[in-house]
Image (cartoon, grey):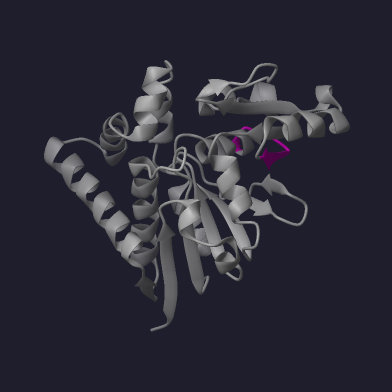
Amino acid sequence: MSERTLRVHTLPAHVDEQQLAGSAVIVIDLLRATTTICHALAAGAKEVVPYREIDETLAAAERAGRANVVLGGERGGRRIGGFDLGNSPAEFTSHVVRNRPVFITTTNGTRALYHARFAKRVFVGAIVNLSAVVVAVKNEPRVDIVCAGTGGEETFEDILAAGAMVTGLCHSTGANWQRNHAARIAADAWQQLLREATAAGRTPADQLAIALRDTLGGRNLIEVGLGDDLADCAAINRLALAPELDVAHWRITAR
């Protein structure tokens, strides 16, 4: 049985950028950047280009021709002034984004993607594309899951999603994954959620949507009136795509 390495990092700051070189990295910002990127590509966006700062996003849009791109993003959970869309998955419909590039900047998720820029491969991970991401990386010898967190704080929603991916990888391959402590803790948290769902007679997605209300990111969304996004972010395997960041050309496309 082959042996591979599977590590979870509960914040980008917990792993040096250079340590991700040679690894297949899954970046998670469950609420909501990575979920939203998946929705945009599933709705037919030509590509999604992530940016760390608002000004660089606007400058890139001007260079590309402002009318040619869809600007999406948030600060403090709310849509940025002058942008077409915020960061709610449901906003990124086919009518708005089909065949158009989406330029996006968010408080945490797009920064986490930048942190992974030295990796061999970079995938956009969420609950909506859980199985697709597991399939995409299951043959990689080394997988690192990087959680975006919120404002430098760990978020339980990202840890739950990481745990779902750890569980999926361990159950779907014959590999002997050497997991770090954080990977084991995340998998335990996901298994506990599944047990709670069974005990309550709920689907895992429904149980997750309830759990998200008590996470840091979930509370922040409810506070700004965006609590409806939680169910969209908890929809397990709604989408069958594993978006990958082409670091050389700095664009995310669907696989």
Along the horizontal axis of the image, is 236 left or right of 193? right
Up the image or down, 146 lies above or below 153; here it is below
Query: The N terminus is located in which quarter?
Result: bottom left
Residue 182 % position (x, y)? 34, 60
Residue 108 % position (x, y)? 53, 39
Q: Residue at x 40, y 42 (%)?
A: 153
Q: Quadrant of residue 116?
A: bottom right
Residue 172 % position (x, y)? 38, 65
Q: Residue furthest left?
A: 199
Instruction: Name the one closer to the observer, 160 or 58.
Output: 58
Q: How many marks?
A: 0
Q: Residue at x 38, y 36 (%)?
A: 234
Q: Quadrant of residue 103?
A: top right
Q: Residue at x 40, y 52 (%)?
A: 10
The magenta-colored residue range is 42-51
Instruction: Name the one closer to the observer, 204 or 249.
Output: 249
Instruction: Name the one closer to the observer, 181 or 97.
Output: 181
Q: Is residue 227 found inside the magenta-colored segment of the image?
A: no
Along the horizontal axis of the image, is 39 left or right of 81? left
Q: Is residue 93 visible?
A: yes
Q: Residue furthest bottom?
A: 1
Residue 218 % position (x, y)? 36, 30
Q: Is residue 243 visible?
A: no
